[in-house]
Image: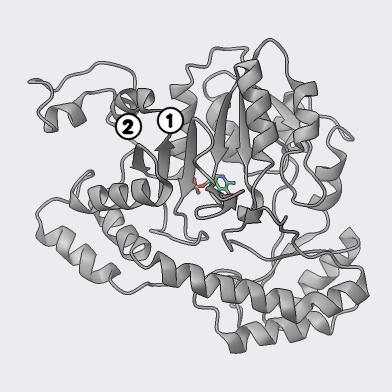
């Protein structure tokens, strides 16, 4: 693997990770749902104002739980943005759902709410939104439409913990939302996630699905006198070792977000003049949205200039990456009927987007190196 002077991502430590892992080990319990898991649950419930949050082994698994909780049946349709990560969709296909791909807005790169109603049919069961780069989808219009049509909304909130729409936290709109604590996210434990349950009516079944289809959680709370098999399920709970690592990051969330905000602002200020003079687009944050400072991207004028920029930065020891090949044109998307031209904005921007190095401990000196290198590039 090539070593970069400035990598795209680097796992950063908030301070107490090793101490809390040692405490978890010393407590004699390293399986799931111990004291550190409870502390992460309480923290996230408070942060999101959610009735219940459950840690999971990944955002992918939280999405799978959401798919199970929606009671999807084969042939039910679920609408997704084409410009998202595969797990947003896979989790629901595992339940037999048929994917319907929506295009995105060219400004925020989020699901285009104006196209949503046209994609709905009597079989539409759910809409899964993803707040790209932690900038909100147009939730007023999406929620109004879905409420009117009796369609559930799930938020894939992997990028967007602490993002806001008109003052309300992202992850608090849908019946459920999912978080990621993968190494590339603002807060991490390597691999991890959470399911946010905004409908108290889903909590009891969610606990069962997460614990192999058993009522183990109720048993430990003394609500039932036997622990037994009551439903389908899987094992979606992380070990206490991971929860201990994650809690060390969550408890420092303010400092982490402040660092990420400073990084975002430095990119924005350092690159604005170059971008304006070179026909390069920078992220757009609508006035009514508070972003999560998850990423900083450039929208290059062409595929050719993007490829050249990535190569040029590589030559300077800087790793910049692109992501999200439109899902409707992937081999799986094509199997479900995806065709070129179906989501023209997704097709266009996915060829032109570049993400710059962004991690909590990215130093101002290294960031200056990136900004100066980019500013010397002619698209
Ligand atoms: C939008 C989105 N959803 C879901 C995931 C999956 O997250 P995890 O790796 O925690 O399963 C990711 C991961 O990068 C993502 O970007």
Q: Is residue 264 left or right of residue 17?
A: right
Q: Quadrant of residue 227?
A: top left
The x, y position of residue 188, in whole percent, is: 42, 59
Q: Identify which residue is drawn at 38% across, 25% down.
A: 202
- Residue at the (47%, 46%) spot, across then down: 179
> Of residues 42 and 220, which is closer to you in this image?
42
Q: Quadrant of the N terminus?
A: bottom right
Q: Quadrant of the C terminus?
A: bottom right
Is 79 located above or below residue 249 in the figure? above
Circle 1 — which element?
Answer: helix
Q: Toward the viewer: 240 or 139? A: 139
Q: Which residue is mark 2?
A: 210
Q: Is residue 315 visible?
A: no
Mark closest to the chain's N terminus, 2 or 1? 1
User: Whole-percent x and y of residue 242?
Assistant: 30, 55
Q: Residue furthest top?
A: 122
Q: Residue furthest bottom?
A: 365
**In contact (CB < 8 Å): disc 2 and disc 1:** yes
Secondary element under disc 2, as helix, strand or loop, is helix
Q: Quadrant of residue 223?
A: top left
Q: Position of residue 123 (x, y in %)?
A: 66, 12
Assess mark 1: CB under 8 A from ligand 1? no
Label 2 vs label 1: CA separation? 8 Å
Q: Which mark is residue 202?
A: none
Q: Viewed as shown, does residue 120 lie left or right of 210?
A: right
* Front position in the image: 282 or 300: 282
Does 113 appear above or below 164? above
Q: Residue 101, image x and y in percent?
A: 74, 30
Q: Left or right of 33: which side holds 256?
A: right
Q: Disc 1 designates what residue?
A: 65
Against 291, residue 271 (above or below) is below
User: Is 39 left, or right, of 12 in this rendering?
Assistant: left
């Amino acid at each position: 693997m090539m070593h970069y002077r400035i990598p795209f991502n680097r796992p950063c430590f908030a301070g107490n990770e090793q101490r809390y892992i040692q405490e978890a080990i010393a407590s004699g319990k390293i399986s799931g749902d111990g004291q550190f898991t409870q502390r992460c649950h309480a923290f996230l419930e408070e942060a999101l104002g959610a009735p219940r949050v459950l840690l999971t082994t990944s955002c992918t698994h939280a999405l799978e739980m959401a798919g199970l909780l929606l009671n999807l049946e084969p042939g039910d349709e679920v609408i997704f943005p084409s410009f998202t990560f595969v797990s947003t969709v896979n989790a629901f296909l595992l339940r037999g759902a048929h994917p319907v791909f929506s295009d995105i807005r060219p400004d925020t790169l989020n699901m285009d709410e104006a196209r949503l109603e046209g994609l709905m049919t009597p079989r539409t069961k759910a809409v899964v939104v993803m707040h790209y780069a932690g900038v909100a989808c147009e939730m007023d219009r999406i929620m109004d439409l879905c409420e009117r049509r009796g369609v559930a909304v799930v938020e894939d909130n992997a990028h967007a913990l602490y993002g806001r729409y008109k003052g309300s936290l992202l992850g608090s709109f849908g019946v459920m939302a999912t978080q990621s604590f993968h190494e590339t996210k603002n807060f991490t434990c390597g691999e991890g996630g959470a399911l946010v349950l905004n409908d108290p009516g889903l909590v009891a079944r969610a606990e069962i699905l997460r614990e192999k289809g058993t009522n183990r959680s109720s048993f430990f709370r003394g609500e039932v006198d036997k622990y037994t098999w009551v439903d389908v399920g899987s094992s979606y709970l992380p070990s206490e070792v991971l929860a201990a690592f994650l809690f060390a990051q969550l408890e420092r969330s303010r400092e982490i977000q402040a660092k990420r905000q400073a990084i975002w602002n430095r990119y924005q200020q350092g690159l604005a003049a170059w971008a304006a003079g070179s026909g390069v687009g920078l992220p757009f944050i609508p006035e009514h949205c508070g972003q999560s400072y998850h990423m900083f991207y450039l929208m290059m004028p062409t595929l050719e200039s993007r490829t050249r920029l990535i190569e040029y930065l590589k030559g300077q020891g800087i790793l910049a990456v692109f992501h999200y090949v439109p899902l409707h044109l992937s081999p799986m998307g094509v199997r479900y009927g995806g065709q070129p031209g179906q989501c023209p904005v997704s097709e266009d921007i996915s060829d032109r987007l570049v993400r710059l190095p962004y991690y909590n401990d990215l130093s101002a000196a290294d960031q200056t190196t990136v900004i100066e290198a980019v500013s010397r590039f002619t698209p």
